[in-house]
Amino acid sequence: MTSWIKAKAHSELARIREAWEKQVYPYFRPFESGGLHTTINGKPIVNFSSNDYLGLTNHPKVKEAAKAAVDRYACGLSSSRVQATTVAHVELEERLAAFFRMPKALITTTGYQAMVGAIMALADAETTIILDQLSHACILDGSFLAAGVPKNGAEVRFFNHNSARSLERVLRTRERKNALVCFEGVYSLDGDQAAIKELLDVCKRHGACVILDDAHGTGTLGTHGRGILEEHGLEGSFPIEQLVIVSTFSKTFGGIGGIILGDEEVVDHIKHRARSFLFSATLPVPIVAAASTILDMLESEGPALVAELKEKAAYMRKSLLELGFDLGASNTHIMPIMCRDERKALFMHLALLENGVLMVPITYPGVKQGEERLRLNITRGHSHEDMNRALELLDLYGQAFFVQSGEPLDDTPSSSYIGP
Ligand SMILES: Cc1ncc(COP(=O)(O)O)c(C=O)c1O
């Protein structure tokens, strides 16, 4: 007899099976070495879907620091931070607080856990959590967990993407006393920045607290890479007691790990209440050492590193627009190539990969139907040669699959290979 979990899996995998059978399944491709330049099945590949925004993950100093930490601390501490904190964790927390100009920092094992833990520690039955409609999964999951706490669940509401007016409407009509507004500095699928000033102004007027997820703004925005607040000259402009910033080591910092920044007591409270932090193992010290080495680089040469990323992103943006590509709402180094058709996105992905360029397709349900795209992130680690090769291939195959013109591929309706 087939179990219900087997039957469920079989039924829900139907679309994925179809993609496997047609050999167009694009995900989980195993890299044979790390970094922006890797190999897949022995073939050299330039990865344009990476979040290694400053291209520092493979820096020899970063790897040396991690290796030295393995010798001293091994790969793990076999316990949670409560009983497995090291001087390396504490020192990096102090340095992160100073770098981001925030009173206190806490390191968690992933950015996902940082966000889920922060929301769950702060929200309760007296709280309305108010989310941008395009929020990352970690914000949604943290909010829904907070809403589901027996007898102490928060209310969860949404505002229209990046709309301060919509946010204000929700703040005015919320049911609970305390408002916790969550939004991102840079949206990872569309590459657009938060309307940060307008959103913070509304929150200030309504006395709302804010959790800002700056995972994609850290190291990429602001002269020194401190993120969206630095980019817009807003550091220190919003009451510190009402602000928590969450970020990650999994992008600019080249590893894994979460960062929570805020008022001392607020961070201490999260440290003692965030279940995703308390009940999961410590971030391994080799990763702490790698992040700490990247922080050294940001401190000593941050402006030059960020400027190089911005110069490369500007070159790519100008070239893509000249070739007629639609970059959607992007105004950062994250520039989705809008295909607006699942098959176009898949065929483009396969044709590029065949020629040594990886751009992962994002299809429904990751994005709405009609908004299918290729993920294209420019990093400081891409050379002009890498970008020119990608542009040449994008133009060639973009024309072949009518991506720039927006014309349909043919008359047959687009079937969904990946989505449900
Ligand atoms: C906006 C955003 N927030 C949080 C995270 C989670 O970060 P981490 O990879 O450290 O779990 C990500 C990563 O995908 C992200 O894109």
Image (cartoon, grey):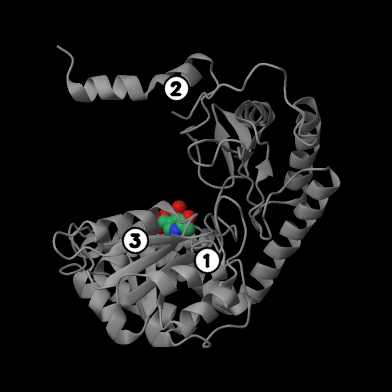
Q: Is residue 218 visible?
A: no
- Answer with mark 2 or mark 3, whichever residue precedes in sequence: 2
Q: Residue at x 34, y 64 (%)?
A: 114
Separation (CA) of disc 3 from disc 1:
15 Å
- On the image, numbered disc 1 is attached to which residue? 166
Q: As rendered, which of 263 and 407 lies closer to the eye?
A: 407
- Answer with mark 1 or mark 2, whichever residue precedes in sequence: 2
Q: Which mark is residue 15?
A: 2
The verdict on label 1 being within 8 Å of ligand 1 is: no
The outermost residue toward the top is: 1
User: Residue 367 vs residue 44: left or right?
Assistant: left
Crowd rating for badge 3 (residues with CA inside 10 Å; few <14, some 14–19, many 20+) = many
Q: Which mark is residue 156?
A: 3
Residue depth check, mark 3 versus mark 1: number of the one nearer the observer: 1
Q: Position of residue 17 (x, y in %)?
A: 43, 18
User: Residue 196 vs residue 395: left or right?
Assistant: left
User: The residue under label 2 is which amino acid type?
Assistant: Arg
Q: Position of residue 306 (x, y in %)?
A: 65, 69
Q: Residue at x 48, y 56 (%)?
A: 133
Indicate the secondary structure of the residue bearing disc 1: helix
Q: As rendered, which of 283 and 289 lies closer to the eye?
A: 283
Q: Which mark is residue 202?
A: none
Q: Residue at x 66, y 53 (%)?
A: 378
